[in-house]
Every structure is written in C-alpha cells, then in structure tokens.
Image (cartoon, rainbow, N blue to C red):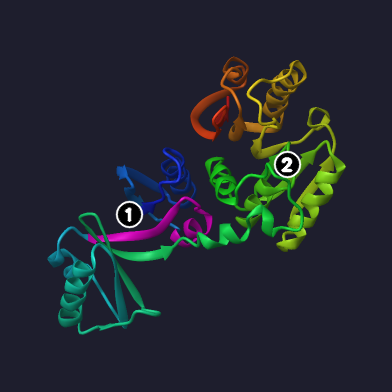
Amino acid sequence: MLLLLELSKEHPTLPVAEARACLRVCSKEYEEKFHNGIYLADVEKLNWKEMALRMAMAFSINEVLGESVDELLQNLNIDGTFRVEGGSLEERKRIGEIIAKEKKAKVCMEKPDVVIRLAGNFFCKELSKIDRNSFERRRPSKRPFSVPTTMHPRIARALVNLAEIKKGEKLLDPFCGTGGILIEGAMIGAKVIGIDVKEKLIEGCRKNLDFYGLQNYELYVMDMREGAFKVDAIVTDFPYGRASHLSDEMMKLYKEAIEKMAEWLEKGRRAVFGLPTMEFNKEIKNYFEIEQIHPARVHKSLTRFFYVVRKT
C-alpha cells in the first residue's frame, strides 16, 4: 500500500521523525518515498488504527489511489456516501461531480462513508484523521495539577513515539514531574514508571494519571540515581530552569543520570530526552549511539535539544 501522511509543520524535524518511528512500530516493513509536508511510503501490513491512536504531529493517514482522476476511479470502491477534502473549492467540486456520476455515489458532508483527500498531486482515500483536539484537551491547565514548565501533550506524545515503545512494554520517566510524558505513554498502552525527588510533584502526578483513568503505573519519590529498574524505553525532560547556564550540581546530576539510565535500559532499546545543551555528547556516547537530535527553541536565550539514543 502506498501511504500518505499529512504532517503538521509545528516543528522542522519532529513530525517526520515521529512518522518513521510509528511506521517501525505499526507496520511489518516500509520504504520511504518522499517527505515535505506530506509523507509517502510503501508500507506492508500497516496497523493504521493503532498508528492513528499514536500519532501527534500529523493531520490524517491516507491510502494513495492514484495520481490522476482515471487512476482514482479505477481504484476507488464506494459502498455508500462520500466527501472530498483538500485542494481548492473548485477542485473538490469537480472531483465530487465526477465521482458521483461514475460511481453512482452520493455526497454527504456530515458523516460520509468515504473521505477522498486531494493532497498535492495525489488522490487518496482517508483511513483516519488524527484527533489533534484530544491533545489540546489534555493541556496542563486542564489537569488537576500542573506547573508552569509542563510540556505540551503533543510534544510529550511525539517523544514517547520516538522511543518506539509498544503496548505492554515498560516506559520510565526518571524526572516525571506532573506526569505529562507518563500520561501519553499510558494512553498508548505502555506500563509507565515515574520518579521524582519532590513528593508534591509525585502526588500531583498521581492525581493527573487518575484523572484520565490510567491505572497501569508505578510512582516513586526518590533521587533517580538511587533507583534500580529494567525497562524497555526511557523518555524524560531533564530538569533545568530558564537560564542557559547549568550549575556544577546540575552538571553532575546530568552525567550521573545518563550513566544510570544506561543501566536501566535493555540493550538495543531507546531513550529520548530533552537537554538544554549539547555539551554532554561525550558522556552520552559512552553508553549510547546518538540517532537523532531535534533542537526546539524555548525562548531567546534557551534552546532545548531532544535526543533519541539507542543503548549499545
């Protein structure tokens, strides 16, 4: 199947990286063809329903039916109603009239049986929309407990996806704070473990997880350097303030945390974490292969670097 993903443009590199990670989890095999706002790949045995539930930085998942109207009509099967989306109003009207005539199908704008999507030069059948509003409904301000520095759920979900965690596997956040990453991991079926040194944050994290009806979690009040775990993935945002300079104490914590996470992670599995600097690359390379780095500007004096690393 030729797959077309409509990607968001909220970050220069994370949407494509998330698409690739989700394809590795949700398909048997894929071959990337093209990406530039839209993402094309030949895919074998795709679980597109699971992919739709996982993805954060896309708008829709589609099967390409052709690059011409003739190919569209040849490959399109409609047993019911349809609607055409994408392109200009004139294009939608023209394609809709052709389909209605040739396929003897009726247009339905409210709840059609089939959505035909015009994306660039491609005519597609929509498999699923991504429920992007669900992430907005989980914004920190909507939760029982939050702090000002809490990560947006869409970013948290993308990071969880980059770790390639699967349903039933263990995901750990050693600096879990109010639980934003844990919420997104648990929502795709992972068993989540959260650690924070502040009891108040762990109490708030528990309230947030319970608020969303998430039960498969473990929470610990401790210095993460004292922990002993074996997990399938680690996703976290290292603690830091809004200043670009790190104290000696924070530098020491980062180095020891990187070593500790390597102890917990199974060989060949991934950790995804945010750092305010790239000066720890040497320490990271002692335990991990650095696969990706995604810079994200926080404010004018601070850039966050999201690392995707694999345990060697």
Counting residues from the start of the chain, the first of labels 2 and 1 encountered is 1
Give the residue type that dot 2 points to: Cys
Residue 257, given in percent of the width and then of the height, sits at 72, 26
For residue 176, which numbered disc appears in the image? 2
Task: Tell me the quadrant of the picture where the N terminus can be found.
Answer: bottom left
Question: Which quadrant holds residue 209?
Answer: bottom right
Q: CA distance from mark 2 to mark 1?
A: 34 Å
Q: Name the residue nearer the viewer: 116 or 260.
A: 116
Residue type, label 1: Leu
Highlighted range, magenta: 48-65
Mark 2 lies on a secondary structure that is loop
255 up-or-down from 71: above or below: above
What residue is rendered at 59% in x and 15% in y? 282
User: What mark, if any, has residue 4 been given in the picture?
Assistant: 1
Q: Which quadrant would residue 310 be assigned to in this image? A: top right
Residue furthest to the front: 300
